[in-house]
Image (cartoon, helix red, strand yellow):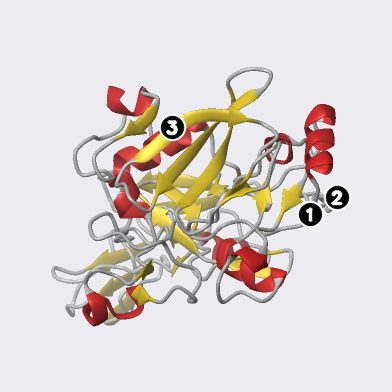
Amino acid sequence: MKKKIVLLLLLTYSLVANSQHNIVISDKSGQDPDPSAVLHLISEDKGLLLPRMNSNNRNNINNPAESLLIFNTDNYCIEIYVQGNWLELWCYENDIPVNPCQGVEGGVEYNGHTYKVTGIGNQCWFAENLRTTKHTDGVDIPRGVTINEWMDADDQKTSLYAIYPYDELEGMDSDSEVVDAYGKLYNWHTVVDESGLCPEGWRVPTDEDWKVLEGEVDSEYDYPDEEWNNDGGRGYNAGKMLKSCRTKNHPQGSGAGDCNVSDEDHPRWDEDPTHYGTDDFEFGALPGGHKFLYAGYHPAGGFGAWWTTDEDSEMFAWRRATYYNSDIIDRSVRLKGRGYSVRCLKE
């Protein structure tokens, strides 16, 4: 349990010193320092302000002295430097809304791309689908094009990614355009490979992580309501809240602004008069489709799905999905050899 320590900080008004080297700083004249104090601060309407800084700035202090004090704006703690470590003297422990993406608000650069992030509850998520072609340790992830390549990777439990075919999307002319819009599709073996997939300090979310997210955004069911432990479609409107608002022929027309797009504008969801996304939490869930194991692709535009790290059996693992014509989020198991989108979660 943290000790609560009252700290008085300096404001220079009148300064008085005596022969015993006692000093008083006061906003009133004629004040003598207490003989037991080397420094005595006196004020009835002012306080002393410690240097305020975040953890990165604190760590950049050159050769901090023993007992140096600062106020850390990341955790709302008064900290003291002792024997090479910053220790928390006192922390404000009320329910302060702390940004879970603090320090990375401008995005996360990873393998040549800067990913947008969004803070939802106590979690910090990538706000776009992963597109890396390398594992965290720099090992290349092979691209799978043929059905045989996908079947072989599943048999050998090795990593593989795919890019949704651009010639199946109106208005798309290259792989790079598809990747910019929807990211890449990965088999489950890529997700759990010991080489890692997300940047350092980030990870692919678990099944439970997704339940926390769903309970945070849904209007009817909080986490850990039993609703989120069900299979299939769950919740009331978590899907609607997380889906990008970009919709083909948005029902609100020009009043929807940039959310109203044409068939050739990507990324975007297929049109639906009721179940369009509102993206209230800037998660930006997008319909990247998916790669079947024994066939081609489920159409992008109408369906988006994301892997979790949790397996159900030797052949199946848990994933999440949402659809253009539904407000819910689907929780179900699918073959590990399929290709789905991936999001990263801050540790």
Figure check: 80 above or below 173: above
User: In the image, is 13 to the left or to the right of 63?
Assistant: left
User: In the image, is 96 to the left or to the right of 145?
Assistant: left
Q: Nearer the viewer, mark 3 or mark 2?
A: 3
User: In the image, is 116 to the left or to the right of 22?
Assistant: right
Q: Give the percent coordinates (x, y) of residue 49.
A: 34, 69
Q: Please tell me how crowded label 1 is: few (under 14), some (14-19), or many (20+) other residues with Cα within 10 Å.
A: some
Give SS at disc 3.
strand
Q: Please tell me how crowded label 3 is: few (under 14), some (14-19), or many (20+) other residues with Cα within 10 Å.
A: many
Inter-mark Cα distance, 1 to 2: 5 Å
Q: Amino acid at mark 1?
A: Lys
Q: Give the percent coordinates (x, y) of residue 100.
A: 43, 53
Q: Amino acid at mark 3?
A: Arg
Quadrant that contains the C terminus: top right
**Residue of label 2:** 139
**Residue of label 3:** 331
- The answer to whether the residue labelled 1 contacts the one labelled 2, judged by CB atoms less than 8 Å apart, is yes
**Residue of label 1:** 134
Q: Nearer the viewer, mark 1 or mark 3?
A: 3
Inter-mark Cα distance, 1 to 3: 28 Å
Residue at horizontal 71%, vertical 36%?
294
Q: How many marks?
A: 3
Front residue of this view, candidates 22 and 310: 310
Q: Give the percent coordinates (x, y) of residue 320.
A: 47, 39
The quarter holding residue 110 reads bottom right
Q: Amino acid at mark 2?
A: Val
